[in-house]
Image: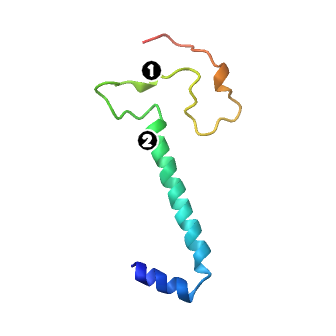
């Protein structure tokens, strides 16, 4: 498979940027999925020690990837402690 790809890139050098952007897009999508799996409070990997991780988050913790108008450092907790 790699030998065929190397042969195609040697005969058609215009495919190099296309391959570069496809690989970059795939890498960025995998990094975003990994971030969702590891940082999202809705995902629970350890159900024995921390069955409800969303209850232990601080109100100032930013878990969204991009917050438009929200300043998380000034938020106060609105719910009860569990």
Q: Earlier in the sequence, mark 1 or mark 2?
A: 2
Looking at the image, which residue is at 69% across and 35% down? 68
Q: Is residue 66 left or right of residue 49?
A: right
Mark 1 in CB contact with mark 2 (< 8 angstroms): no
In the image, is residue 7 above or below residue 51? below
Location of mark 2 (residue): 37
Residue 36 pos. (x, y %): 48, 42
Sort mark 2 into few (<14), some (14-19) or many (20+) by Cα contacts within 10 Å. some
Residue 18 pos. (x, y %): 59, 73
In the image, is residue 10 above or below residue 58? below
Please identify the quarter of the rendering in which residue 76 is found: top right
Looking at the image, which residue is at 53% across and 83% down? 9
Cα distance between the residues tagged 1 and 2: 17 Å
Looking at the image, which residue is at 51% across and 60% down? 26
Q: What kind of element bears circle 1?
A: helix
Looking at the image, which residue is at 50% across and 50% down? 31
Q: Is residue 59 left or right of residue 3?
A: right
Q: Is residue 69 left or right of residue 9?
A: right
Residue 19 pos. (x, y %): 55, 72
Instruction: Please tell me the numbered disc located at residue 63.
Output: none
Please identify the quarter of the rendering in which residue 71 is found: top right
Outermost residue, top side: 80
Location of mark 1 (residue): 55
In the image, is residue 20 above or below residue 52? below
Instruction: Identify the image quadrant of the C terminus.
Output: top left
Please identify the quarter of the rendering in which residue 45 is found: top left
């Amino acid at each position: 498979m790699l030998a065929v790809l190397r042969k195609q890139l040697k005969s058609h050098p215009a495919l190099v940027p296309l391959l570069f952007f496809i690989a970059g897009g795939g890498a960025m999508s995998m990094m975003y999925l990994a971030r969702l799996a590891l940082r999202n409070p809705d995902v629970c990997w350890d159900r024995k020690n921390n069955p409800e991780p969303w209850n232990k988050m601080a109100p100032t913790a930013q878990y969204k990837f991009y917050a438009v108008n929200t300043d998380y450092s000034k938020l106060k907790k609105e719910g009860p402690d569990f």
